[in-house]
Image (cartoon, rainbow, N blue to C red):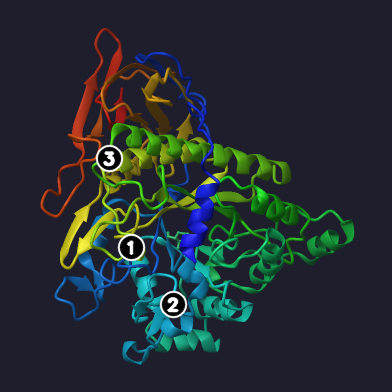
């Protein structure tokens, strides 16, 4: 059950945090000079780092995404239009579905065919809610297409079989004359769907099992081998027999089989927070595999930020110490990423296998008056700041971290969007995602700066967190987060190889660290325009307290 696995995650994350992050030099004071190495480009920040997660949990799907064709809430084929419009604006690259813990209890056949004939089942993971199965494969794929996103489908490795998973993928991707393609067409979809990512179970050490790492690897190989994607547009180039023969004879398996630009990527269910056991065992098995029999392209990592007590950290009305605790725990993501990267580098120095953080976010005390297992929480400016810090960590490790999926998309945990009946409001995290759009597929640029210190009680954090990238527009973009709720921070920006005379963009801040957007006050935490102009050849940034600033440098 999710609660058990969540508690297990907490146990992994209660050791003290590092003070400052990777390429940020902490010292006594900001301000200082921020140098962008625009002449030393790093890896591409894969746009899938900005992915989302939508689970059948509470009102995450029913009410939040799906209202049904007959609803008075404006919708297209049952998917609510206001939510689609908002998600299109943040250019969601990929969405993970149907879970989470739900995935390992989901039987896809319940969710196809005429709506009136679909089985009604019980969502035993999440509060025993009624699962009408009216949102199934076709509805999810339609939703993903409406928002312009790729699909990341997690198959049931918990209570399902290899055969069930293989048949689901065949149903989604086969072409005529396969019977599965005809059945799909009879249900309204002729062309095969594109499934960019295939999730091989979820939290297999917890709600998806529990399995030891070895037990998981044994099962996973079967799913990785037999679940085929038949969409011709996702086909891999044919493998030359001589390659296979060489592989079999050599005793030294080849790195990987040739893949096409749209080949489906298989993501193994990986570690819980900083626990290395799954990563070690999966990567060891991967290293010695023969890719003609099974392969994976990623390992997932789940890491939530709980605050001082799992499920009990206040969402609003918290003290500055609690604010700092949540931000401190956010920095632990970097420690985990580094730890898993180290193991992966040992077995896979060429970085074939990505680290996929497919569940992360701030997990707080549920909103009063709501079903506790629906995981609805208020979201404040603090959580938007935590989102920016996490994204910065992912960008700094973009060589290995090539997809992440924030938990979750609508109404659940650190959701982008909150709905209630026909009403919709955008959370601070939504605005951070919108501000970061230029970082999608941008090239990471190393930076050095004096991060300063922000101290509360025995917690010391860098005052400022920042990243830089060269956008697809060819411009240099900076994201600068000032964690300190009491002091502004000033920087002089120096960009190697670029003369910047001004910078313009947006800043997200609010009156209080716990300011939230509500249906009544939807704009309490919204970005405002900000710009800086060089004087005497110097471009000086002044970052307001508790803020996230994203700017584009202009020559
Ligand atoms: O995101 C909520 C739950 O958290 C997911 O279902 C599960 O994978 C994790 O424990």
Mark before the other along the chain sequence, 2 or 3: 2
Q: Can residue 548 be seen in this view?
A: no
Q: In this view, does 318 lie above or below 143?
A: above
Question: Is residue 261 left or right of 475 when viewed as pictured?
Answer: right
Q: Is residue 542 above or below residue 422?
A: above
Disc 1 residue: CB within 8 Å of ligand 1: no
User: Residue pushed farthest top?
Assistant: 536
Q: How crowded is mark 3: few (under 14 residues within 10 Å), some or many (20 or more)?
A: few
Q: How far apart are marks 2 and 1 (CA)?
A: 41 Å
- Taking depth in this image into account, of 320 and 407 the one nearest to the observer is 320
Answer with the quarter of the image where residue 338 lies: top right
The residue labelled by disc 1 is: 372
Mark before the other along the chain sequence, 1 or 3: 3
Q: Is mark 2 on a helix, strand or loop?
A: loop
The residue labelled by disc 2 is: 191
Q: What element carries label 1?
A: helix
């Amino acid at each position: 059950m999710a609660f058990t696995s969540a508690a297990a995650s907490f146990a992994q994350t209660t050791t003290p945090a590092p003070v400052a992050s990777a390429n940020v030099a902490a010292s006594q004071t900001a301000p200082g000079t921020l140098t962008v190495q625009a002449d030393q480009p790093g890896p591409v920040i894969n746009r899938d780092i900005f992915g989302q997660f939508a689970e059948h949990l509470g009102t995450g799907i029913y009410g939040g995404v799906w209202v049904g064709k007959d609803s008075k809430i404006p919708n297209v084929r049952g998917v609510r239009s206001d939510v689609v419009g908002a998600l299109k604006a943040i250019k969601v690259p990929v969405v993970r579905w149907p879970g989470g813990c739900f995935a390992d209890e989901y039987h896809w056949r319940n969710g196809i065919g005429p709506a009136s004939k679909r089985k009604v089942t019980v969502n035993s993971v999440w509060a025993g809610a009624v699962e009408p199965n009216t949102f199934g494969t076709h509805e999810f794929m339609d939703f993903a297409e409406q928002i312009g996103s790729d699909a990341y489908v997690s198959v049931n490795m918990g209570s399902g079989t290899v055969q069930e998973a293989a048949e689901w993928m065949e149903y989604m991707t086969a072409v005529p004359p396969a019977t599965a393609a005809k059945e799909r067409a009879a249900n309204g979809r002729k062309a095969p769907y594109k499934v960019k990512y295939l999730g091989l179970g979820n939290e297999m050490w917890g709600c998806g099992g529990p399995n030891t790492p070895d037990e998981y690897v044994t099962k996973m190989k079967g799913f990785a081998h037999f679940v085929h994607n038949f969409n011709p547009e996702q086909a891999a180039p044919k493998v030359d027999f001589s390659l296979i023969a060489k592989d079999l004879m050599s005793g030294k398996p080849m790195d990987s089989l040739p893949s096409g630009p749209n080949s489906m990527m298989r993501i193994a269910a990986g570690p819980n927070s900083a626990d290395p056991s799954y990563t070690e065992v999966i990567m060891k098995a991967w290293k010695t595999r023969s890719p003609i029999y099974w392969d994976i392209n990623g390992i997932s990592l789940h890491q939530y930020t709980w605050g001082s007590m799992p499920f009990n950290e206040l969402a609003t009305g918290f003290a500055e110490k609690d604010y700092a605790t949540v931000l401190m725990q956010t920095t632990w993501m970097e420690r985990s990423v580094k730890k898993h990267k180290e193991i992966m580098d040992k077995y896979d120095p060429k970085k074939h296998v990505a680290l996929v953080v497919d569940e992360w976010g701030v997990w707080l005390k549920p909103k009063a008056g709501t079903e506790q297992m629906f995981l609805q929480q208020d979201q404040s400016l603090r959580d938007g700041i935590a989102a920016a810090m996490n994204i910065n960590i992912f960008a700094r490790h973009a060589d290995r971290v090539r997809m992440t999926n924030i938990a979750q998309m609508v109404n659940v945990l650190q959701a982008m969007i909150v709905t209630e009946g026909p009403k919709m409001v955008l959370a601070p995290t939504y605005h951070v995602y919108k501000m970061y759009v230029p970082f999608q597929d941008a090239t990471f640029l190393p930076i050095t700066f004096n991060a300063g210190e922000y101290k509360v009680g025995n917690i010391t954090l860098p005052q400022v967190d920042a990243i830089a990238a060269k956008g697809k527009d060819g411009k240099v973009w900076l994201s600068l987060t000032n964690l300190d709720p009491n002091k502004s921070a000033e920087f002089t920006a120096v960009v190697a190889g670029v003369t910047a005379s001004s910078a313009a963009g947006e800043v997200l801040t609010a009156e209080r660290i716990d300011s939230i957007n509500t249906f009544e006050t939807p704009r309490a935490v919204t970005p405002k325009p900000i710009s800086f102009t060089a004087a005497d050849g110097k471009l000086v940034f002044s970052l307001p307290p508790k803020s996230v600033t994203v700017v584009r440098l202009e020559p």
